[in-house]
Image: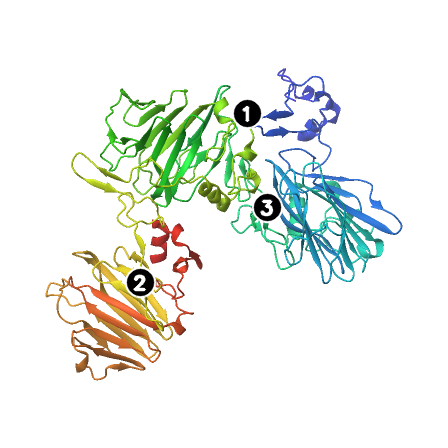
Amino acid sequence: LAGSCDGNQYNDVKDSSKITGSSGTDNCNGCFIDSTEESNFVYTYTTSTGVVYEEPKEFTGTCTCGYYIEDCCVTVVPSQTTDTESESSIVDGTFTTFDGVQYELDTRGEFEFYNSSETDVYIRMTPCGLQDVCLTQVQVSTETASVVVHAPYTNTSDAVVFGDDGQEIDFTNAITTTLDENTSITKSDDNEFVVTNAGDNTETTITVNSEGTLNVVVTSLINSCSNDVSGLAGSCDDNLNNELTTGNGDYIDPTSASSEDITNVADAFNVGGSSDSESPDGGSSGTDNTNFVYNYTDDSGTTYTEPETILSSCPPGFFGADCSLVLEDESTNSETHGVATVNEDGTITTFDDVTYDVTITGEFTFANTSDGVVSVKLVPCGDTVCVTQVSVETDKGAVVVHVPYVNTSDPVIFDQDGDSVNIAPGYSVYVGDIAVSQLNSETFVVKDQTGNEVTITIIPPQDGSIDETTGEPGVNTGGTHTLKVNVTVENDGCKSLTNSLSGSCDGNVNNEFQDVNDNDVPVGMIDEDTLNVVADHNSVNANESNFVYTYTDSDGEVYTEPQTFESKCVCDFYLDSCCISVTTPSDDGSLSTTSINGENSTLTTFDGLSFSLGDGGEFDFVDVSDMNVSVKTETCSTGTCVTQVLVQTGDGNIVVVAPVDEEGNLIGEGDVVVSSGGETTSSVDTLTSNTVGNTTMEQNEDGDLIITDSDDTEITIRVSENGGLDISVSVDKTNCADMTGLTGSCDGDIDNDVVIDGEPVSVADITSGVLSENIN
């Protein structure tokens, strides 16, 4: 194609007679190489982690089957149509429409396959293996009946059939079950089911293929499938050009379809939501039309759970139902050893190179070998969770490495009795049969007698700044040091590992994770909730672990941390300045009370969740019925104090101000200053009127201001010892339903007191960032 450098432009293209301006390069027929004999190009590549990439040697159309870059396959085959009936099918993942358009759908989710006036067929496509999408549920519905067939839950079980009530249908005593007067399902073989609708003579045959997933064939009479039908199955009108529709009336020519066209076809019949994998809402989780099953308990009591919401596709290199897993292209393992890692950003990479994130706090088994156990402690830090302790235990001893307790101190090593161990860079010590070496101020190597090795590196606090290489924001650890952990185990010791966060090194990524029943969870069906279940399944009993909760340094300073964490904001926890606590709510039966402590601006919601309002500002405290209460906080001698309260009603406002001296400093004595109706006073009795519409103001003998309205809402404001304003609001519970503000509602549920963008955040998921966003 480069021609020659002889100065003659007219011999650069083989057929020079065809040259017309710049278009001559289209005629270089003699430049082609025989791809089967002469070239060195590569058509198949397998990564060290088992991912296979294939590409064809030649391309004959826009959609090329099996080509990894353009995940699109469309062709035309003879239709299975007779004079009276026609078939559409999904066999081993390949869709064939009634008129013979054949394509592969690599989009996950729930879709309308066939929809006619009397029979509807819906399908659920879920991740399977690493890169594939499989048919795992088929729903057949008629006018008054519905049945769902689910692929076998294990390799040794049969498919399971559910009725429209979600209960399993038992075929023990009869091979045919009648669903309504026209509809029945027949179990014709161990794994073959035929749903018959006598109303329109449609038969839907569902079988289990060799991969353990489902095939489905819909057989319909010509007069049923040729008119007024929709879905991925197309129609049987002998017209190829109306088989693929985008849903807006446009049709796609199957001979020139692109991957984008096939995605648009899938979107048109997605019954569970958008198929946009870039959007957090771009999943599929069912609608009122579908009865797909996400939880099933078999006769032995084993429960199987799968994600309801599945993103339609994942970006390259990402896997899982929510695309939260990463599979590294290059393995860190060698021929003799496997490596698992807790990374600098807190993510975990298993022995088989699956990278994921654990978002819950606790103590977990990281690697569990026959020779010893490596455990990690995850604690709240900033907006995430961090590894702050690593325990390495054999049957003869244990070693715990703890992050520095303050930024200016060194990490601390403990033995199994919780006693600190003296060590310095360049030196080694033995604890039982465990050798501990400190390579430098940041790195420790722990070895057992069998050669298993744990390398622990101290990572300085991270501030969430942008990574210059990736352009992505990093993690914010809230000023906390974290631990990077590399566990290196001989292959014989890690190939059969189970029940740990690090998986095993057998090369099978689909047995890295086990659920509460010790069932393997394929990577394709992993999402954040599943990962948290997996982590919880591998949790360590705090009473049995070697982790250290109290430490006194050489200066006598005592550091204490809890064994367990109710949330990611823990009061008095030296590693985190975020503080929430749960108290018993103030409740006398008919009334519920919320309050703010004037000395430190700590708010307690109606349901008993307490947190500080932080730095100064103005906040919507509670909005109930016809009354809104706001507060203003400012810096004071004890931190942050409430200095003003604004009560707004439909008839006017009341402003309450804390007493100050001549220099404007808060004083812990005197009465509050009240402004209402253009008057300002420290004694309500001197006001022209102590009412604002239906709201009444009174002062008791202690000088407390009490504001009440006709709905029995009562506000009590008093001056605290440091001069800030203590405020409590009691409301009738009948007024709780429509309440807003920082106080949440008074329904007894603390897990909906903090709301972000209209969605409640459970106490366990509250971080300093969540709390700050809620307050702001």
Give residue 584's position: percent from left, percent from top. Answer: 32, 61
Q: Are marks 3 and 2 in contact (CB under 8 Å)?
A: no
Could you say which quadrant of the image residue 358 lies in? top left
Mark in the foreground, 3 or 2 = 3
Determine the secondary structure under disc 1: loop
Along the line of sight, which residue is nearer the eye, 588 or 198?
588
Outermost residue toward the top in this view:
6
651 in relation to 218, above or below? below
The residue indicated by pointer 2 is 619
Amino acid type of the residue that numbered disc 2 sits on in the rendered structure: Phe
Give whichever of discs 1 and 2 has the lower sequence position. Answer: 1
Alpha carbons under labels 3 and 1: distance apart: 39 Å
- Is any part of residue 344 visible from this angle? no
Determine the secondary structure under disc 3: loop
439 in relation to 619, above or below? above
Along the line of sight, which residue is nearer the eye, 416 or 264?
416
Q: Are marks 1 and 2 in contact (CB under 8 Å)?
A: no
Along the line of sight, which residue is nearer the eye, 58 or 97?
97
How crowded pointer 3 is (Cα within 10 Å; few <14, some 14-19, many 20+) is rated as few
Alpha carbons under labels 1 and 2: distance apart: 56 Å
The residue indicated by pointer 1 is 48
The residue indicated by pointer 3 is 300
Amino acid type of the residue that numbered disc 1 sits on in the rendered structure: Ser
639 in relation to 75, above or below? below
Give residue 508's position: percent from left, percent from top. Answer: 56, 30
